[in-house]
Amino acid sequence: MFNAVLRSSSHDSIFIISPKSDNEGSYRSIVAQDQKSIVEAATHQSHVLDRPDWNFDMDQIWAELNAEATGDGHQPLQAGLKPLLSLVLRCAALQGLPFPSISAAENGGFEAFFKSNERGLLISGNSDLSVQAFGDFNGEIWRAKLDRSMPRSRPVTADQIRWLMQRY
Amino acid sequence: MSQISDREECGRGIWDSSKAKDPINAKVFRDRFGELEVSIDRLDTADLVALADLHDKARGGGRFKGWGVLTAAQIRSASCEIVEAPLPENPWHANIVFPEASKADEDQWKQISVTLAAMARWRSK
């Protein structure tokens, strides 16, 4: 089976695809453990965002993304994704990731691409408010999806976003 | 059989100023979902001034900024092929060809673009 469906203790559904190699039989799965709210941590550690790389204006970023989407002939971004993108950026700052390259996706979503050396991490916020991550860490590729369509699903949490980033 | 050696540097053209820097956005290495070919330039053999001029004229709106650069070996390591595809106006043109399976698998299609972007570096024109 190519992917596995797991549940975190907060009952949000998580799809994980994480290959060890090209052999489909050797896929492994990982699930978030840490339940501490990164949002609460961000509130108390907002000084991290004062670092030069992390000075950002969410309204300006959002306006630029919508301008990009419109310019490319795509639909405007789903308004409900704005707090999610803000959450992604705050989590990334606290994780010590470099500032990402952010772009509008074709379907009203956004993509934030982080890169350090030859490690890449794409966080994709989709118009249905699901979140996907695509990683390539020096040739080790992995994917994850937080899917709100599953039973008992809830909005994506900061813990889940941090989990997506923690292996970076 | 491709005649492009593993060491050869190839560049994906970038016109959008917001993407003309490191890190190269993964979106740069995708076209529309379902399309397997992504245009690139063979930088080692190209006349870069002429090529930049050509790209400036090719798109009426924005001016050409530069390339997201990869070696042919890096492209092949992402499970892609690289094939020569010279055009009358651009003899240095080639294509990155994504695996056939990515034509119907959007996640794989995106994943490959991440792999390519993770290895790419910015090069100004």
Image: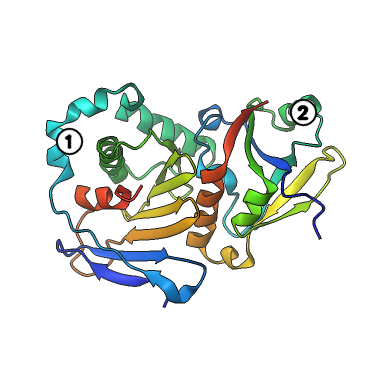
- Tag of residue A77: none
Residue at x 47% of width, y 74% of height:
A24
Amino acid type at image mark 2:
Leu
Residue at x 32% of width, y 48% of height:
A165
Q: Is residue A155 left or right of residue A59?
A: left
User: Which residue is under mark 2?
Assistant: B48
Q: Look at the image and tell me whether residue A19 can be seen.
A: yes
Residue B123 drawn at (x, y percent): 62, 30
Q: Is residue B113 left or right of residue A165?
A: right
Q: Chain of mark 2?
A: B
Residue A89 drawn at (x, y percent): 30, 37
Amino acid type at image mark 1:
Ala
Q: Is residue A160 left or right of residue B61?
A: left
Residue A167 drawn at (x, y percent): 33, 51
**Quadrant showing the N terminus of chain A:** bottom left
User: Which residue is under mark 1?
Assistant: A42
